Image: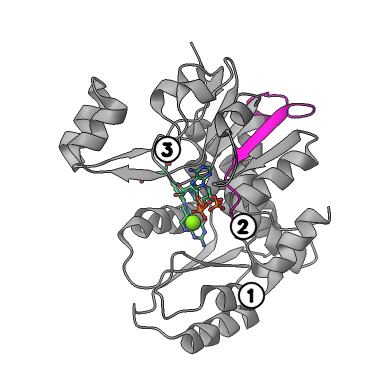
Amino acid sequence: MPKVLDGATIAAEIKQDVAEEVKALAARGVKPGLAVVQVGHVPASEIYVRNKVQTSKELGFLSEHITPAETVTTEEMLALIATLNAREDIDGILVQLPLPKQVDAKVLLDAIAPEKDVDGFHPVNAGRLQAGRQALAPCTPAGVIEILKRSGIPISGANAVVVGRSDIVGKPAAMLLLHENATVTICHSKTRDLGAVTRQADILVAAIGRPGFITPDMVKPGATIIDVGINRIDTREEFDKFFKGNDKREAAFAKRGSVLVGDVHPAAFEVSGAYTPVPGGVGLLTIAMLMANTVRAAKIRRGM
Ligand SMILES: NC(=O)C1=CN([C@@H]2O[C@H](COP(=O)(O)OP(=O)(O)OC[C@H]3O[C@@H](n4cnc5c(N)ncnc54)[C@H](OP(=O)(O)O)[C@@H]3O)[C@@H](O)[C@H]2O)C=CC1
Ligand SMILES: Nc1nc(=O)c2c([nH]1)NC[C@@H]1CN(c3ccc(C(=O)N[C@@H](CCC(=O)O)C(=O)O)cc3)C=[N+]21
Ligand SMILES: [Mg+2]
């Protein structure tokens, strides 16, 4: 039976560590400040943003949830970011993606002060990360490393295969695995004979954005699978592809009319030695690492 790498338990450990740092900072009169900017109404963003704001409050941060209208312009957003950059009480700025199409996301993300870029999306942080300098690393890839380390899964010398090469997940995940001395392969939509590559993986990271894409034949028996994908399924036909006969998922589907599935087919987990579930896996670590990054940003920026 494969081991389930429980994101909730690991996230709780990280949040405990963060809470202790917050206490030590409070004793020195410092409160980490996080601004979460959520533009318009993207249904998928609601729950994530709520999680972020709630968790930062629980941990005793100064927490601001800023909600510009759907119709906001790039210029207005730049003015908001300039204000947040200049504020002494704000240590971290997060602009939730996706943004409406009239807003130039790249221009905005580049305008965030790198020392307040708790998402780790700014090119300065990406460059610092790849150059092996101190950097704010993107939260989801950082969470992947934390899960592996805290679960005692050896990374050094392992064959790690990352499927997906986005600037916010796949690429930085590969870079962090490399820094931990894994032998890293990055795959993408042009990769030839993907299954042959993924079957070499001791650690397989799926960050593709396609429900159940990784099938059992693509997995080396006993491998560790980290499923980053978050895909919402809302038709019976799709549901049956992944969860037919699964009572717990049936109940969730009946109740909400949709369920989440990762980029890994549930049957592929059965081949693995250990895996992160969706939900309850990497997503929860993303939130925890955002908190850790915010405290880190506070300490660095305030010279502590
Ligand atoms: N758990 C969490 O906290 C988070 C989860 N996510 C989830 O992770 C997933 C990936 O997100 P993100 O990186 O932003 O997605 P992107 O769409 O930016 O990138 C997807 C990557 O997958 C590759 N890909 C697509 N189709 C195939 C294919 N058929 N074979 C091989 N590779 C393929 C693409 O290749 P190419 O470059 O060639 O197009 C691309 O590199 C999504 O499900 C997203 O919802 C994202 C962020 C946080
Ligand atoms: N600037 C920016 N930074 C991000 O980090 C960012 C973003 N934009 N846009 C969207 C993606 C996605 N993302 C997730 C965060 C938490 C969960 C999460 O909490 N998941 C839980 C609950 C899922 C649920 O029940 O819906 C779980 O997997 O168990 C998932 C996904 C952050 N992202
Ligand atoms: Mg994306």
Q: Residue at x 62, y 61 (%)?
A: 118
Q: Compare residues 26 and 213 and report the one nearer the observer.
A: 213
Q: Secondary structure at mark 3?
A: loop
- Residue pointed to by mark 1: 110
Q: Position of residue 220 (x, y in %)?
A: 59, 19
Type of amino acid at the residue the image marks with label 2: Asp
**Residue 19: in sight, yes or no?**
no
Judge from the rendering whether residue 124 lies leftward or rightward of residue 105; answer left or right.
right
Between marks 2 and 1 in the image, the one whose residue lies nearer the viewer: 2
- Residue pointed to by mark 2: 167
Give above or below for 127 relative to 206.
Answer: below
Most extreme residue toward the top is 1
Residue range highlighted in magenta: 149-166
Ligand 1 within 8 Å of disc 2? The answer is yes
Q: Determine whether label 2 and label 1 are within 8 Å by CB.
A: no
Q: Determine whether label 3 and label 1 are within 8 Å by CB.
A: no
Type of amino acid at the residue the image marks with label 3: Gly
Give above or below for 28 relative to 198.
Answer: below
What's the magenta bit mostly, secondary-structure-wise?
loop
Marker disc for residue 262: 3
Q: Secondary structure at mark 1?
A: helix
Task: Assess disc 3: are there few (<14), some (14-19) or many (≥20) residues with their C-alpha within 10 Å of its C-alpha.
Answer: many
Q: Residue at x 24, y 42 (%)?
A: 258
Type of amino acid at the residue the image marks with label 1: Asp
Going from N to C along the chain, the mark reached first, 2 or 1, is 1
Judge from the rendering whether residue 127 lies leftward or rightward of residue 226; answer left or right.
right
Q: Position of residue 242 (x, y in %)?
A: 31, 29
Marker disc for residue 202: none
**Residue 209: in sight, yes or no?**
yes
Residue 37 is inside the magenta segment? no
Ligand 1 within 8 Å of disc 3? The answer is yes
